Image: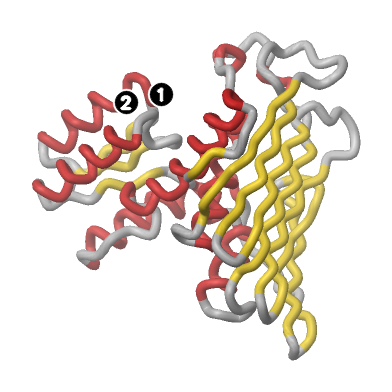
Amino acid sequence: MSVLDLTAHADVRLDLMRRALNADKHVLSQKPFVESLDDGRELIELAARHDLKLAVNQNGRWAPHLAYIREAVRAGLIGEVTGVHVEIRWNHGWIGGTPFEAMDNLILWDFGIHWFDFLASVIGDRARFVHATTSRAAGQSARPPLLAQALVTFDRGQASLVFDGATRYGARDSTSVIGANGVASSQGLDLGHQAVELYTEAGVARPLLAGSWFNDGFAGAMGELLCAIEDEREALNSARDNLSSLKICQAALRSVRTGVPEPV
């Protein structure tokens, strides 16, 4: 069994993935998976013809707090999801002077894709419209806008993703998933320090989390692909599944350009 972990940027990775699949190699693609949904579907079909697995390194799915919330939803502990709300207050100004500064939609595309993917992992294909905005923050020196937000309308629910990427002090990271029968939420100073609470009719549970996003999230993404190959099943982070995440994210990017809600 041969697996290639392709970490090049999306604009050059497309041809590398084609070549790897045509050489009968399973592939783990860096995120964002592709820049075009049509290219994504082409690669998925190519992998299927070769009986190969194609997955995406959406390592946030294995961040302990996000993984717990996702599995609580999958287990039906909070019922049908009606709300998903994410607030990230970080200082993303470190991108100044790096290649990331060349990305116009850095926050929603390269960074926010983790949370669009998390959203898709708990609501599936229910997203219908996205209204998104970006803005430069007062005092920021990095070139691309460091402020971004997206409101997502999905069947029988709503979601909000707010990224304050120019927060110099008072960093915070919170995620809440509201269901018909409960709430699963997490908050902390950063990705490595999160406390999860699960509220249901039975009361409140506060699980002790093990591991961290870095580096356990990366091990989780590759490990899930390897297990899927061995078990002859589709990976949780399969490219086919990742199309749902990309649809929401790309609708957000279109909304930034048009200034109106865009269909998913």
The reply to whether residue 10 is in sight is yes
- Coordinates of residue 146 in the picture (x, y in percent): 72, 25
| Amino acid, disc 1 | His
According to the picture, the residue beneath numbered tag 1 turns out to be: 9
Residue for point 72% across, 37% down = 163
| Amino acid, disc 2 | Arg
Count of residue discs? 2
Position of 255 relative to 97 (above/below): below
Q: Quadrant for residue 247, please give it.
A: top left
Q: Residues within 10 Å of mark 2 (few under 14, many from 20)?
A: some
Q: Residues within 10 Å of mark 1 (few under 14, many from 20)?
A: some
Q: Nearer the viewer, residue 154 or 163?
A: 154
Residue for point 42% across, 43% down = 57
SS label for mark 1: loop
Q: Quadrant for residue 32, please give it.
A: top left
Residue for point 39% across, 53% down = 237
According to the picture, the residue beneath numbered tag 2 turns out to be: 13
Left or right: residue 261 versus residue 182 is left
- Coordinates of residue 188 in the picture (x, y in percent): 80, 53
Position of 4 relative to 13 (above/below): below
Position of 100 relative to 249 (above/below): above
Q: Nearer the viewer, residue 258 or 119?
A: 258
- Coordinates of residue 235 in the picture (x, y in percent): 33, 58
Left or right: residue 67 versus residue 232 is right
SS label for mark 2: helix
Left or right: residue 261 versus residue 202 is left
Residue for point 42% across, 50% down = 244
Q: Determine the CA span between mark 1 and mark 2.
A: 6 Å
Q: Are marks 1 and 2 in contact (CB under 8 Å)?
A: yes
- Coordinates of residue 47 in the picture (x, y in percent): 17, 45
What colouring style does the render use?
secondary structure
